Amino acid sequence: MPRFAILAHDWPAPHFDFLLEAGPVLKAWRLLAEPGAGRSVPAAANADHRSLYLDYEGPVSGGRGVVSRWDGGTFEWVEKNAGRFEIELCGAKLKGRVVMELSSPPVATGGFPPGVLPCETPLTPHSTPAPPGATAGVASSDRPASVIVPSCTSSRWICVFARGWSA
């Protein structure tokens, strides 16, 4: 079963990273409020993340703050359509259905899940997290050099956490 993680991230402003395992990468959304039963939380699609973020806590390289695990566990796909999908989460804090829906009609389809817009913003540097004990933003031969990946924060989503959640 695929895994998910929700990370509290303090940079550039406090938010939550919602990460879903999709093969070798994590599909990512920035949640602009804390998840909770019966809440609709604004979300922005983000660039794919490396799977190590499923378990990582600590400083993010490049001076991009610190992440801490808010919740994590497994999930199951319930429905996948263009611009909308439903999953069932089974985490340590959260158990229940999540509906992610594109809040404006997609101009193109592609990616994963169906309906995620291709990135329309310029490419930005994205580097690996600093290993435990390392100083964020300091180059290290223990981790790969920065790579360029698309910045996907222009896609607007609504993340609905169904009632009946345990939290």
Image (cartoon, helix red, strand yellow):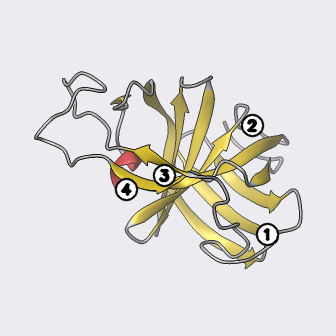
Give the residue type at disc 4. Ser
Image position of 140 with respect to 151: above or below: above
- Marks 3/2 in contact by CB < 8 Å: the verdict is no
Mark positioned earlier in the residue sequence (1 or 3): 3
Position of residue 93 measured from the top left corner of the image (x, y, whole percent): 58, 39
Q: CA distance from mark 1 to mark 4?
A: 24 Å
Image quadrant in which you'd find residue 155 = bottom right
Q: CA distance from mark 3 to mark 2?
A: 16 Å
Q: Earlier in the sequence, mark 3 or mark 2?
A: 2
Q: Give the number of the disc on residue 83.
A: 1
Identify the residue position indicated by label 2 in the image.
36
Q: Is residue 126 left or right of residue 81?
A: left
Q: Is residue 124 above or below residue 60?
A: below
Vertical comparison of 152 with 10: above or below:
below
Residue under the point 59% across and 69% down? 76
The quarter of the rendered structure image containing the C terminus is top right
Q: Which mark is residue 51?
A: 4
Could you tell me which secondary element the residue under label 2 belongs to? loop
The residue depicted at 73 percent of the width and 72 percent of the height is 115
* Comes first in the chain, label 4 or label 3: 4
